[in-house]
Amino acid sequence: MGTKIQPRVPRGMRDLLPQKMLQRQYVIGKVENIFQRFGFEPLQTPALELRETLMGKYGDDAEKLIYDAKHREGKEDLSLRYDLTVPLTRVVAMYPELVKPFKRYQIAPVWRAERPQKGRYREFYQCDADIVGSKSMLADAEIVTMIYTVLQTLGFKSFVTKINNRKILTGIGQYAGVPNEMLGGLYRAIDKLEKIGADGVREEMTKSAIPANVVDKMIDLVSIPPDNFGELRERLGDLPIATEGLGELEQLATFLGDANVPRANYQFDFAMVRGLAYYTGPIYETVVTEPKIGSLTGGGRYDELVGLFSSQSIPTTGTSLGIERIIDVMDELAMYPASIGKTVTQVLVTVFNRDLIGASTRAANALRAAGINAELALDAEGLGKQLKYAAAKAIPFALIIGPDEAAAQKATLRDLTSGEQTLIPQSELADAVKLKVKS
RNA sequence: GUGGCCAUAGCUCAAUGGCAGAGCGUCUGACUGUGGAUCAGAAGGUUGCGGGUUCGACACCCGUUGGCCACCCCA
C-alpha cells in the first residue's frame, strides 16, 4: 500500500454516529407516530429521479441546486431528488388507482448543492406529509394542526406557524401593478419585512427597480398587522384573486379554531412568502423564536403540480418538517428526555474468566429472551477493564458472575451510576434485572 | 453563487520568523473479584493540502480544500 487516502465525506454531508442516531431515531419515531395518528401512511420512492421529472417544477434558482447523477454509460438522465413533493406528484400521476384523498408521509434524505452552513446541509432528511385529492380548507387545517401536534409533542414551546396565501400575494402584485417578471423581486422584498423593517423593504424594492409610487403602496399594504383580515379586504376587495385567497384563509381560521390549536401558535401573516414556484393557495411556515435558525417547517397547497404529469390535475396540500433543524434546536435547548441514553445496551454481562464464559453467555441470553438489551463482554481480560468499558459507553448496569456467584447459582448486578450491587438468584435473573433496569 | 473569519496531538487550545507545547482524553502499572478518585510512566504531529519569500516558516505571501458566519436562497 502506498500513501493513505484522506478519510473524508463530501462537502456539506456527514456521518451520523450512533449517539446522534439514537437522538434522530427518537425524533423521527415521534414524528412518524403523529403522522400515523392523523391517518397518513408511509411511502418510499427512489433517491434518483429522471432529470425531466424534477426540472421545471421548482423555479430557476432552486433548480440550479439539483445534483445530476447520471451513470457514465447510462442512457437515462438522472438527478438526486431535491424534495419529496415532486416525487409524490409523480407517484400520484403514475398510480391513478390510489384511493383519494391519498394521505402519505415520507421521511427520507434529499440533496441540494447549496453552500453549507449550520442547519443547512447538502444531504438532509425531510419529513413530508401531504393530502392529495382534497381542495377543502379542512385538509389545510389538518396539516397545520398536525404541525402543531408534532412540535408540541417534541417539547417545543414558543413557535408560530405563519400562514399566508399565494392568491393574496398575487393580488398584492396586481394591486401594485408590477409586471410579472418583477414579481419575484417584489415578493422577496416583502418576505424580509420582519428581518429588515419597512425602511429596509423600501430600499430593497427600489433596488429591484420597482417604481416609487408602487413602493409606497406596498409598504402601506404590507404593514397591515397579522390576522387583520378586514383591513386587507378593504384594500384588495376589488381583486377577485385576493378575495378568493382571503376567503380561504378565513375558512382555515375557522377550522383551526374548531381543532383547538392554541391561538399563540399560528398567525396569518400577509407578508410571508415561500420561494417554490409550485404553490397555488395557502402556504405555511413555522419559525421558533428562541434560537434563530430559520424555519422548522414549510409547505402549502399546490393544486396544479400533479397536472404536469397527468391529464387531470389533483388538488394537493402538505408540509415538510425540517428534521435537521428541529434536531439542531433540540440539541441547543437540550430537549431530549433522559430516557434516550448514549447507548442501546442496558446491561453489560461481564465474563469473569474462560471457565465462566458459559455461565455468562446463558445469563446474557436469558436477559435477551426477557427483552433486555444485553451485551456480552467478548474478552475475559479482567473485570476492571470490562467495567471501564461499560462506563465509557455509559451502559447503566453490569452483571457479574464470578466463581462465588456461580457456586451459589447467583449473579451480581452492579448499578454503574450509584455503585450499588445486588445479589440475584440465577433462576429469577430476568425478572429481577428487568425491575432494576426499568426503574 | 458573492464577501468575511478560521484550520496545530483523539478533543479544547498555546507557541516575537529561531528545538512544536499544555490541559483533558487514551494506553500501561501501583490494584492477580470491581469503572468513574489519587500517584508514577508511556504513546500520540509531514502544524489541512500545494507552491513561494527567507540562512531558517506553525507564523509572512499566493493558490487550493474543508468548517463556520453574513448575503442569496432555503428544511
Image (cartoon, coloured by chain):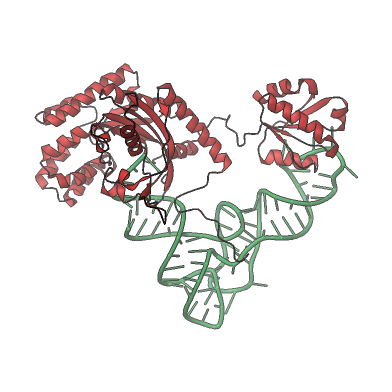
What chain is the green one?
B
* Residue drawn where x is 87% and y is 32% of the image: A403
x then y, percent, for residue A100: 32, 24
**Residue A299 appearing in the image:** yes
Left or right of A192, for residue A27: right
x then y, percent, for residue A219: 17, 40
**Quadrant into which the N terminus of chain A falls:** bottom right
- Name the foreground residue: A35 vs A207: A35
- Name the foreground residue: A368 vs A235: A368
Residue A238 appears in which quarter of the rendering?
Answer: top left
**Residue A425 appearing in the image:** no
Left or right of A307, for residue A388: right
Q: Colour of chain A?
A: red
Left or right of A95, for residue B20: right
In the image, farthest residue toward the top: A258
Q: How many numbered callouts?
A: 0
Left or right of B18, for residue A429: right
* Residue drawn where x is 73% and y is 26% of the image: A366
In the picture shown, does residue A228 fall above or below A272?
A: above
In the picture shown, does residue A62 fall above or below A264?
A: below
x then y, percent, for residue A50: 35, 45
**Quadrant into which the C terminus of chain A falls:** top right
Residue A38 appears in which quarter of the rendering?
Answer: top left
Residue A174 appears in which quarter of the rendering?
Answer: top left
x then y, percent, for residue A36: 43, 24
- Name the foreground residue: A361 vs B22: A361
* Residue drawn where x is 61% and y is 66% of the image: A2
